Amino acid sequence: MFDRDRWQEIWSVLKKNKFRTLLTAFGVFWGIFMLIIMVGSGKGLQNGAMEGMGNFATNSVFMWTQRTTMPYKGLPRNRRWTYTNEDIPVLRENIPELKYLAPRLQGGGYRSGDNVVRGDKSGAFNVYGDYPQWNKIDPVRILAGRFLNEIDIDESRKVAAIGTQVRDVLFKNGEDPIGQYIRIQGLYFKVVGVFEPINSNINFGGDKVRSIHIPFSTMQRAYNYGNNVGWFAMTAKDQYKAELIERKAMQILKKRHDVAPEDDQAVGHFNIGTEFDKMKGLFNGIKGLIWIVGIGTLLAGVIGISNIMLIIVKERTKEIGIQRAIGAPPKTVITQIISESVFLTTLAGYFGLVAGVFIIEMLATGMQQSSGSDNMFRNPEVDFTVAISALGVLIISGILAGILPARRAVKVKPIDALRYE
Amino acid sequence: MIDLSNIHKSYITGTNRLHVLKGIDLHVKKGELVSIMGSSGSGKSTLLNIIGILDIHDEGDYRLNGQLIHNINETKAAALRNKFIGFVFQSFNLISFKTALENVALPLYYQGVSRKKRNRMAAEYLDKMGLLDWSDHMPNELSGGQKQRLAIARAMIHQPKVILADEPTGALDSQTSYEMMDLLQAINREGITIIIVTHERDIAERTNRIIRLRDGNIGDDHQNGIKKETTGVFNRP
Ligand SMILES: Nc1ncnc2c1ncn2[C@@H]1O[C@H](COP(=O)(O)OP(=O)(O)OP(=O)(O)O)[C@@H](O)[C@H]1O
Ligand SMILES: [Mg+2]
């Protein structure tokens, strides 16, 4: 393969037609360049979308109540109903596939002006009553202190974990919020933790940086929710689909609250898993499209190479005839021509690859410098396997491009080749 | 060395069929120096190409060094050519992008001889042809005579049993032609069989045996009292 005579021959042939060689090589260069750019950008788009929900427990379901639409067991339609604390153990016991269950309440008040006050500072924030499990379903990054824990729930402590923007509004720059008190709708809560969101692309009702989490039990008692549960968030164990727990939970809850089993309107629900799958499907579709278009472009380039190899072989008919007359076996001639084709394809493709990766890297660094946290296009990248498989595709296409011209070269009788003018 | 019996060859162009060789019987022994003459289009080149396994006869038996040439594939033919035959062409047929040395070394390359060894041998043969100083020159930098000497070196390097030369002097002036014949005669004296196709009577006169083709048959085949050599060009300093 790597013998000097062969390379010398490849080189002299390609050199003889510099311009034509260059043009042909450009086809392959462009093909692989476009492929890399598209794959990299597709990946960037996907990263942007996926990173905003990267840590979210994706096989999660949310469930709230809506008015009934059917009469049932003597109860009228259009009835309001709510989940209650008693539902919690029943769900836990009857759905073994459940990994996390987080009953939630959302406090009111923030719509009607500033609901949270500290000294002379105040702001309007979302207040949630939560179980510690919530932080497993939609994890946050704790910057100081801690999130809520079981003891907070058991003792209905008046403690709060606050988002970064809450901290920025209520506290002076550099002031340590941990252990300080804030007043939420008239009641004092001790700040036990400050967090920043990780999954910034998934929000419920409000920006997470402007959220305050207090213990679920505290919220029920302090703000007169009785034993009402606003909604349930639940996650299935890893090996189960979210639809399964979704279906089971709906069945149990309807039964417990005398809602007609076929009344689908009465339970509002949202399945992150399905949304996530749709998104994944979309990106896989984009990826597939990119490869189809990319390979198509590349193929056009390869056909160009095959074409030029045919012309080269035709021009060299006599010279190949001489070589065969003095003893070059067909195998040598064939490998020679295929090597030329592979050389041309791979060299051009390699430059395309390098140029493509270079552009993608430039984009990536440019993006890092101007980073906003919720970019829809993030970290475009070309992974090593893509580059390697692209090179593999190139070498194979080079061989394919060379086969036809090589066969053409040995098909003529040596004497006819020698006579060729 | 070369045994032809009842060799036929026709060319088919479109609907026409041109019967060029009509049953040639020819035996050339090892070490002979033979010339083939005949009018243009009489089939001299066709015959030589069949002997050189560059082309295939339609009918009859051809034995090269005792081996029947029949139904052989191109790989085998290439190997046989490489082993037994050296070619010298009227138009030299040198490879334009290779240096003189590389051109001469080429047959050895196809035999898989190492680069070092084949370059050493090529230099030796170039030296015999008085072309050592031109080793690194490209063929287009050489004169016609030099080119043909280069071609002879290439035809010799793999030590073939037979050298086939199709009008080797056709493109050379008479002085150079004689030098070429001196060379071929010298090579022949080393025991190598040589067949030369030529139009020129004085070239044929310098071979031991003259064969005339006429109408696709051998019209005349006679031994020839060889003329003297001019000078010892071969092995000159
Ligand atoms: N490949 C071919 N296809 C068709 N006809 C051919 C082919 N090669 C040779 N011929 C014909 O066969 C005949 C013999 O050709 P050949 O080349 O053997 O003649 P030649 O004796 O060498 O002539 P010259 O002295 O002019 O070289 C000619 O009439 C020629 O036109
Ligand atoms: Mg001829």
Image: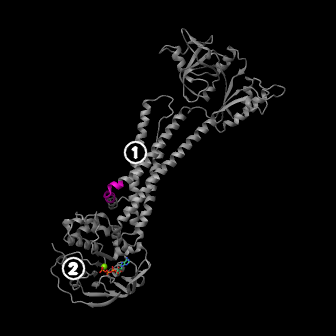
- Return the residue at label 2: B181
Disc sitting over residue A16 in the figure: none
Circle 1 chain: A
The extreme top residue here reads A120
> Which residue is found at the position 53% from the left and 17% from the top?
A167
How is this picture coloured?
one colour
Q: Is residue A114 above or below residue A93?
A: above
Circle 2 chain: B
Percent from the top left, x then y, of residue A396?
46, 56
Percent from the top left, x then y, of residue A418?
34, 72
Percent from the top left, x then y, of residue A206?
59, 23
* SS for callout 2: helix
- The type of residue carrying mark 1 is Val
Quadrant containing ligand 2 reads bottom left
- In the foreground, A23 or B131: A23
Percent from the top left, x then y, of residue A164?
53, 20
- In the foreground, A294 or A10: A294
Name the quadrant of the N terminus of chain B. Answer: bottom left
Q: Quadrant of residue B46?
A: bottom left
Spatial distance from mark 2 to mark 1, Cα to Cα?
59 Å
- What is the magenta range? A11-21
Q: Quadrant of residue A217?
A: top right
Q: Is residue A349 above or below residue B160?
A: above
Disc sitting over residue A354 in the figure: 1
Q: In the image, is A94 to the left or to the right of A365?
A: right
Q: Main secondary structure of the magenta part?
A: helix
* SS for callout 1: helix
Q: Is A375 colored magenta in this rendering? A: no
Q: In the image, is A294 to the left or to the right of B148?
A: right
